[in-house]
Image (spheres, coloured by chain):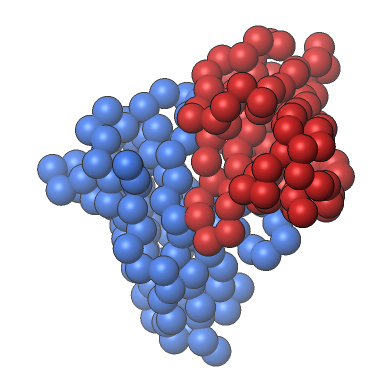
Amino acid sequence: DQQVKQNSPSLSVQEGRISILNCDYTNSMFDYFLWYKKYPAEGPTFLISISSIKDKNEDGRFTVFLNKSAKHLSLHIVPSQPGDSAVYFCAGTSGTYKYIFGTGTRLKVLA
Amino acid sequence: ETGVTQSPTHLIKTRGQQVTLRCSSQSGHNTVSWYQQALGQGPQFIFQYYREEENGRGNFPPRFSGLQFPNYSSELNVNALELDDSALYLCASTSTQGDEQFFGPGTRLTVL
């Protein structure tokens, strides 16, 4: 039972354009969501998070949107840069310890 | 501020052997979680340790066990290794103040 799904294994975007990465979840008990970025041979790096009481959170070029009724969240990166090329994981949690991750989306930003 | 470190970086074992992986948490963090990331998958939660006690466990058999030490560093032990245990093992630490987990670079375990 995959509680967090990232249905797009890969995404290519031109430098300077918007990247939109999507994530769906099934567990209505999740109250906190996070996005992590992972480069090869490194561990995941925390990017941005959102509480279920919000529908939007911004941090610089990164914005996460949460649609609880649709059980959907998305990560927007504007403008996209070549250094953003990485695998992006979304995760949900209903507590402070057990993160449930999606399978990741590989983003490639073309110069 | 020192980040999360893990050792060794890579490890090759044969089926049936036992392995111990190590993790030092980020300074000020007293909670450590372990995850297994198989190829093409997202990290899967194994268990978490808080103040030297197991504080939650994922869907992994008892041959996966752990320890946390008074300095908050941690070990993951896997007995009777199976081929499917080949994966990247990630350690993450967090403080009680915040929810975000900070990950180490991982240990790549190959079971032959």
Viewer-proximal residue, B93 or B21?
B21
Residue B70 visible? The answer is yes
For the point 66% across and 26% down, the residue is B63
Q: Is residue B104 left or right of residue A45?
A: right
Where is residue A60 drawn, in percent x and y?
47, 58
Q: Colour of chain B?
A: red
Where is residue A52 drawn, in percent x and y?
28, 35
Where is residue B88 drawn, in percent x and y?
67, 50
Viewer-proximal residue, B16 or B98?
B16
- The correct choice, above or below, for A42 with respect to B17 in the image is below
> Of all residues shown, which one is farthest toward the bottom?
A111
Tally the numbered discs. 0
- The correct choice, above or below, for A111 with respect to A8 in the image is below
For the point 56% across and 68% down, the residue is A86
Q: Which chain is blue?
A: A
Q: Is residue A24 left or right of residue A39?
A: left
For the point 32% across and 30% down, the residue is A31
